[in-house]
Image: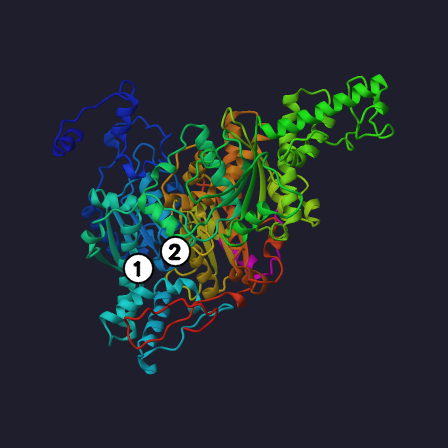
Amino acid sequence: SARARADRRGGAHVMASPATTPTSERRTMYRAQTPPPSMRHLNIFEDVEPSGFPSEAAPARLTASEAIWKLAQGNKRYCEAKHSPHARPKTKLVDLLIEDPIRPRPVEALVFACAISFAPTDAVFDAEPGQIQVVRVCGNVCEKNDGVIGSLEFALAAEMPPVLLVMGNSMNELVDYAVIHAMKAAGRSANEIPDKLPHKGPQMVDKLWVVHMLAPAAHDALLQEPNGSFAKLCELACKLNVWRTIELLLTSSAAINQAVTDGRLQVQGAYLVVETGKVMMLGEHPSKKLLLAECPSSDVIRTADDPPVPAEEALATMYAGNRRYCSGMGGLVTGTMDKQLLMQLSEGGQNPISVVLGCADSRAPIEILFDMRPGDLFVLRNAGNTCEATQGSLIGSAEYAIAHLRTKLLVVSGHTKCGAVTAAVDLIRNAVRRVRQERLSGEASLRSSTLSETEAPPSPGLHGRVKSLDHISLTEKLGSIGSVIANIAEQAKQAVMSMPSATLEEQVKLATKLNVFATIEKMVQNSPLILEGVKRNEIELHGAIYDIFTGEVEWLGEHPRLAAVCAIDMPMHNWKVSPYVRGAPPPINTLSPSAACLARLKAGNDRFLVGEPSPHSEIAPEPFAIVVGGAEVRVPIEKIFDAGPGELVVQRCMGSTAGRRGGTLFKSLEYAIVRFAPRLLLVLGESHSKIIGAALKQVSGASAPLAPMRAVLDRVMVSAMRAVTQMGKETAMTTAGREMKIRQLSVELNAFYTIEQLLTSPIIRNAVRHHGLQLHAAILNEHTGVVDFVGQHPMQSELCGDEGPGSPDEVKLPRTVTSASPNRRLFAVTDEPEGEF
């Protein structure tokens, strides 16, 4: 009974009424646990109220030992059913996509596994939907503060399970390649080393960066078993890679480290023998106490070693930072700076996400109003945020940040009540007033004006309109400030001429906006470096105006005549600045291999919906498609498409993103494309993704998350910001309709943005151009199970571009240092651009 269960827990059972219990107490009653302090930077459930059902409705939280025992028992059932597949009853999984609101099942384990799908991870443990949560990447590897660790932290922040299981597996070709390199470097005889493993694709698999990430495990395997066979070394290297991944999690994630230290979480290893389906539980890291001795910093600082930030993500970060500042949540990021981070910044070099040209006005502090830390922004300031019409120190400084610091975004920020702009407008107004007086009094020819009588503007009309001010010049001697005013004078003339009857405040407001765009135009026209970057869609210049009273930044976007300024057609730019409306997908060549892959996925989803899966027993020789999906879906993605073992490569992370170029998620997909040469890569968005909700909160001013979480949110905020901006210009009949449309836009645009980032990879572009790969977007309706196939990116041809620098043949790879001693580094990076392993 409920009372007996309460007594066993050491306390009397009390049935409290939800109607009379305070909300804060109900949250304590009905939630399994609250997020740990280190994870409260971002609670994606903070707006969700308890359902109002008694606490006995939710199953009790398991201990780590109980969770491991249940996983082991589930794996035992899986192995038994593998030999008698008809012994297990069929279950219509589509009915289990939505969590039971009365008896929600707590997540019992978070599993980090390989993306190459020999079997769904849930199936390996015979887990029911929602029992375990899965993050998957090729080789189950990660790097410090990357999207993988961010996904794991998000999952733990949502609901802390007792166990995080890092699971390696046999038949891992990434490990095989790394072991081959290690054996060669150690001088093992040729007959002990197998020939190169079979692979497809345009480039040698063993030269991909993801193989390097497994080099330490292969090195240590050879160190432990110097005379071991190839098979023995591969098994040992795979297990050592599990330990290395756990080590990275404990030493780089403050949230995971703290949860393990407090006893709320155990991080354990496991090894799946693919041939039998048996999972070997490896336990906790043998050096756990040593790894937990020092908790890592909860934040990181960008240094020169980090990859450059795309302009879209930098803009979204600044947008969210200003929203935090306006909502009173600013300062949380700057408050995390400590001596260790400052040391990293001073020694590691700078890597700013944006160049900001702002006004020197003391009321417009650039870093503060964008809630940025030291090292985030490369700030240039002068009175009036102006730019000379010729090359100079300001343009040279911006070019330095773009060329040497690899910054992709340039923001020109004006502000309200700008003294320089006000002075310029006031000067023009005075000149207009004098011209009017001279024309009306007939004394123009007697005065020493710079305007001749024939050049004088016509008398003002009924509304005092002055039709032309083109020849008015500034005659007052203002000293050095005169050059500043001269840079703004033309914009001031345009403002006064277009609004002759307006007040000074209204004219200054318009002149401030015109001045921002004029500065952008001058920087593009007078800098070949900036112009070329804009033409290649690598650099973006955005305008902004800061309200010194409210603190809010009005984002003006890119130059309204950017194509004319650059003297080139810019279809990709036009697509980004136009409202997104999903169009009808273009006709598909039904005879193409990619169309056949899509048809297989559609047919599989249809079988999933009716609960009639096809029987699958043997592992497919090659996967026919790659799916980039989210980690929140309760049902395995293989089941959603009714795919058999080995038919799909399924990479799962929070937000269905591919990470940043050069990151773990990106490298994983490049490996899968080169290794298997699929004809289809499907980016699968989730209709009700909590990560989309978290990104929308960020662009609304929510507090800043931890650094690994930002590695996920920075990607998703790009689409959230665009969706919010688009709906701000459209009219919805209801609040609910507006919010639903924003979420729909965010999900679809996020899938397309993932494709945009994937196509920055020379390897992936080459596969699209020459090997028949197609990238498609699709949206999973998490309430119905229906997959809506959206199609290819609307600007696919522009994204692929032409052959040029950065093609796969020109990708620079490190060279191996060959040594007979296993103590030497296997993959030492040299200054030479090319070499062999």
- Residue at the image point whose x is 75% and y is 21% from the top: 433
Quarter of the figure that contains the N terminus: top left
Amino acid of disc 1: Gly
**x and y, in percent, of residue 796 in the image:** 60, 53
Q: Earlier in the sequence, mark 1 or mark 2?
A: 2
**Residue 734: image tag:** none
Closer to the camera in the image, 357 or 653: 357
Q: Secondary structure at mark 1?
A: strand
| Above/below status of 193 relative to 791 | below
Q: Is residue 82 visible?
A: no
Residue 90 percent coordinates (x, y):
35, 49
Please state if 794 lies on the left or on the right of 744 as rendered. Answer: right
Tell me the quarter of the picture where residue 27 sits: top left
* Coordinates of residue 572 in the picture (x, y in percent): 62, 48
Please tell me whether residue 586 belongs to the stretch shown in magenta. yes
Q: Which residue is mark 1?
A: 168
Contact between labelled residues 2 and 1, with CB atoms less than 8 Å apart: no
Q: Name the quadrant containing residue 387.
A: top right
What residue is disc 2 on? 137
Q: Residue at x 24, y 30 (%)?
A: 55
Using the rendered image of the protein, determine whether residue 360 is visible from the camera's viewpoint: yes
Q: Which residues are magenta?
A: 585-601
Q: Amino acid at mark 2?
A: Val
Residue 479 on the magenta segment: no
Front position in the image: 178 or 685? 178
* Residue 466 falls in image quadrant: top right
Give the crowd class for mark 2: few <14, some 14-19, many >=20 residues within 10 Å: many
Closer to the camera in the image, 719 or 337: 337
Classify the position of the C terminus by image quarter: bottom left
Asked if 706 appears above or below 102 in the picture, the reply is below
CA gap, disc 1 and disc 2: 11 Å
Residue at the spot 53% in from the left edge and 43% down from the top edge: 749
